[in-house]
Amino acid sequence: MRVKSVKFFFVIFKCFVAFVICFLSTTVVGQDLEPRAYANLPKGTNVLAVGYGYNKGNLLLDASLPFKDFEIDTQIFAVNYIRSFSLAKKLARVQVTLPLADMQGRVLLNGEEVTGSRSGFGDMRVRFGVNLTGSPALDRKSFSQYQQKAIFGVSLVTSVPTGRYYNDKQINIGTNRWGFKPEIGISKRFTKIYAEAYVGTWFYTHNNDYLKGNELKQKPTVSFQAHASYYFKNQMWVGLNTNWYKVGEVAINDVYNGDTQKDWRVGVTFSVPLTKMQSLRLQYHTGIYADLGLDYDSLTLAYQYVFF
């Protein structure tokens, strides 16, 4: 009886670990820093990743909030699933990410220190992308013989308002609005170097329940990110990452606050294979420049499993 209980415990534990690892994206705060979004894959590839992230600093899941002296510790568990397939003989992929966050922080508001906590699911992200040139949809056998060319692709990232939201709070995990980011990306694999760059613009719907019935709207946010990765013989790789944001101006009941934010972040990613189908990925990134908010350090660890 005890042996069965121990086996049952390990089954539950493995299921939990698998759930946590799938949960990770690079970050869940709208600061995309995701390498290999347009990388070449065989069609029919499935990628399941689970991860844990820790962020510390002035981190707001809604970058429009004009708080100063804001400090927060955020722990994030995330599930991430990717599926590649053929669309009009082009390589396409869909990616779904769901975060779970726990936030503990303090803020200086009107000269007084206020502490608080939030926990719950964040907004789900869905990315649908197609590589238009440079990576046709190939099966595993044909893929191994294909010499990759420069890739040009397009994506649409959708932020789904699944996150926990309180209409009487200014700081929330969820945003209570939809977001849509059309994006274009280019990438090129050299002998040992993989280089890529993406540019996109976030468009947001209105939050009609901001602070008990007020309307919050925001102008589009422009984003740019670039990555350069060096590959070793055993498929281990290390990458340098950077991104830049210009956050759109916010209005409450059609009154704009006059503030625009610019943010520049840099980071490093290290990926090591465990087996042919499994790997671990560690990423760290930090802010170089921030007008207001989003001045934080982030560390994430993810386990990735590939299957067909």
Image (cartoon, grey):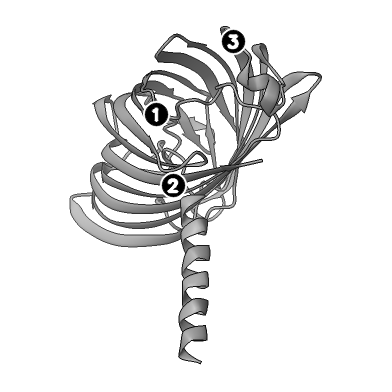
**Residue at the spot of label 1:** 234
Q: Considering only vertical position in the picture, is 91 above or below 158?
A: above
Residues under numbered marks 2 and 1 in contact, where contact means CB atoms less than 8 Å apart: no
Label at residue 303: 2
Q: Nearer the viewer, mark 3 or mark 2?
A: 3
Image coordinates for residue 36, horizontal then vertical, percent: 49, 25
Q: Which residue ends up furthest to the right in the rendered image? A: 88
Name the element at disc 3.
loop
Mark 3 or 2, nearer chain start: 3
- Residue at 59% across, 47% down: 161
Q: Which residue ends up furthest to the bottom in the rendered image? A: 1
Can residue 59 be seen by looking at this rendering?
Answer: no
- 304 lies left or right of 72: right
- Residue at 29% across, 25% down: 266
Q: Considering only vertical position in the picture, is 2 above or below 20?
A: below
Image coordinates for residue 201, horizontal then vertical, percent: 54, 21
Q: Nearer the viewer, residue 244 or 259?
A: 244
**Residue at the spot of label 3:** 147
Answer with the quarter of the image where residue 291 lies: top left
